[in-house]
Amino acid sequence: MYSAAIEALATAGGNPEIRALVLTGADGFFCAGGNLNRLLDNRSKDKSVQAASIDQLHSWVEAMRACPKPIIAAVEGAAAGAGFSLAMACDLMVAARDAKFVMAYVRVGLTPDGGGSWHLSRALPRQLATEVMIEGKPIVAERLHHFGMVNRLTAPGEALKEALAWAEELAGLSPNAVGPHQGAGGSRADPATRRPSEH
């Protein structure tokens, strides 16, 4: 899945006919995150195995951040763990009012990956970002909208429709005007997914 996502981003980024992208889930959920049993099992393996798994996710997030086209997250249901990280890696976010976001890593003795802690610390007040990371409890879309992380709220089941309409609107604008404003809160080549030793 990681490789397919990265390939799709590269294809879209190089196609002048594509002006905006939408990232969404299926069956009423954005993304439930990684398989926690697999993640826990990997902890008993060589560190290179653990690193390889995390690096694949990081490569996906880095490809999103490097994409020259705006990416809109359309969030329904839950965006958990890596799913939350992927949503935050998008340039814009549309979410259903009943959508929930959660960094549940702490509940299984893990730390956020995919640039999760980096994005949270820049998108939310420090105390709220800390609460989200150390408690591992869900936070509702309306609260994130209040703080500006979620751009637009919709009725349940309408997030994708709204995101597609927004993407169509952005596609009608000059790509030379839209592109430079992506990642306005930080460089597109930000250090979101670097390992601590690389900072």
Image (cartoon, helix red, strand yellow):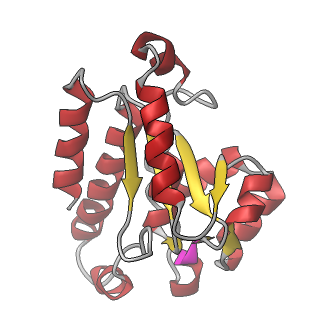
188 in relation to 120, above or below = above
Residue 183 in which image quadrant: top right
Residue 168 in which image quadrant: top left
Residue situated in front as seen by the camera: 135 or 49: 135
> Dividing the image into 4 quarters, which one contains the N terminus?
bottom left
Q: Report whether 96 appears left or right of 112.
A: right
The magenta stretch is 101-105
Residue situated in front as seen by the camera: 47 or 84: 84
Q: Residue 145: x, y in percent?
A: 73, 54
Residue at 42% x, 70% y is 31
22 in relation to 15, above or below = below
Q: Residue 62: x, y in percent?
A: 36, 41
Residue situated in front as seen by the camera: 136 or 15: 15
Q: Report whether 52 appears left or right of 73.
A: left
Q: Residue 192: x, y in percent?
A: 50, 44
Q: Residue 194: x, y in percent?
A: 43, 45
20 in relation to 115, above or below = above
Residue at 24% x, 24% y is 17
Is any atom of residue 104 visible in this view? yes
Is any atom of residue 150 visible in this view? no
Q: Report whether 134 appears left or right of 194.
A: right
Magenta-span inclusion, residue 97: no
Report the number of discs.
0
Residue at 31% x, 49% y is 60
